[in-house]
Amino acid sequence: MTGLRETVAQLSRAQKPSAGTPAYSRFVNRRIGRVFAAAAFLGRRTPNQVSLASGFCSLVGIVLIATVRPSVTLALAVTALLVLGYGLDSADGQLARLRGGGSPLGEWLDHMIDAVKIVLLHSAVLISFYRFDAFSNESVLLIPLAYVCMSSVLFFGLILIDQLRRRHGGGQKPNERGDSVLKSLLIAPTDYGVLCLVFLTFAWPSVFAVLYGALLAVNLVFLAAAIAKWYREMALLVPGVRG
C-alpha cells in the first residue's frame, strides 16, 4: 500500500497542466486515473494493456445500452462501466509518462479507441430509444443522431488542429486564465465524464432525454465557438513553416 501511495504522489507531481481542462476530468478523473496508473505500474502492466481495458469497459457499457431495457440496475451498471472506462483512459497516458514516455502505437491505439467509443455510445442511445419505444415522438431520435455528428466533427477537429499546429509551427497560445477553476466549471458540460454521469438517469427516459439534449446544445455552442477560433488561428499560420 505504501508503494501505491508513493507512486500516486509521484504521478500527481508529474501531472499535465490543468488549464482548459473541464472540471470532472481535472478534479475527478485524473485522480482516478492516477490510482489505476499506479496499480498498473506496480502490476507491471503496459499502457496499451490499460488502453484496451478502458475500451473493453466502455464497450460492455455501450452494448448494455443498446440491448437491455432501461432500468435502475442498467443505469447504475452502465454508469459504472463508462466511468471505469474513462478512468482507465486517463491512466494509460499517466502510466506511459511514469514509464518514461509513450509510443506512436500507444497514441494511435488511444485515439482509435476514443474515436470508436464516441460514435458507438450515441449510436447505442439511438438504438435504445428506438428498440424500447421510449418516446411516442420519434423526433427525439434526432438527439443522439445529432450527438454522433457533433462528437465526430469535434473529435476530428481537435486532432486535425493539433497536427496542423505542429506541421506549420503554430504553437497553442498560453491560456491567459491559467488554471482557472471557474473556467473548468464553465466548460464542464463538454466533459465526457459529465456525459457518463448523465446515464444515472437512464432508467427515466424523459429525464435522461432532457439532460442529454441539454448537453448536446451546450456542446454545439462550444463546437461553433471552437471552429471560429480554429479558423482565425489557421488563417494566421504560414504554409510550409515548421516548428
Image (spheres, rainbow, N blue to C red):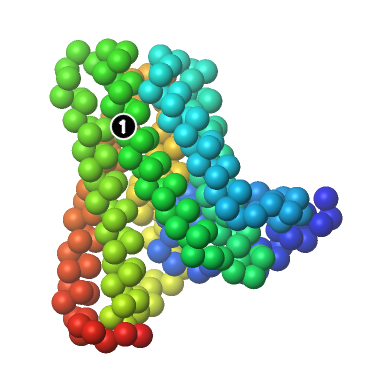
Q: Nearer the viewer, residue 21 or 54?
A: 54
Q: Residues within 10 Å of mark 1 (few under 14, many from 20)?
A: some
Residue 123's spot in the image, x, y percent? 31, 32
- The residue beneath circle 1 is 123
Residue 46's spot in the image, x, y percent? 65, 55
Q: Nearer the viewer, residue 180 or 198?
A: 198
Quadrant (top left, top right, bottom left, bottom right) of the C terminus: bottom left
SS at badge 1 = helix
Q: Is residue 207 left or right of residue 42?
A: left
Q: Residue at x 63, y 59 (%)?
A: 95
**Quadrant hosting residue 97:** bottom right
Q: Residue at x 42, y 54 (%)?
A: 111
**Quadrant hosting residue 172:** bottom left
In the depicted structure, whether residue 241 falls above or below residue 57: below
Residue 87's spot in the image, x, y percent? 56, 46
**Quadrant hosting residue 3:** bottom right
In the depicted structure, whether residue 121 falls above or below residue 47: above
Residue most toward the front? Answer: 105
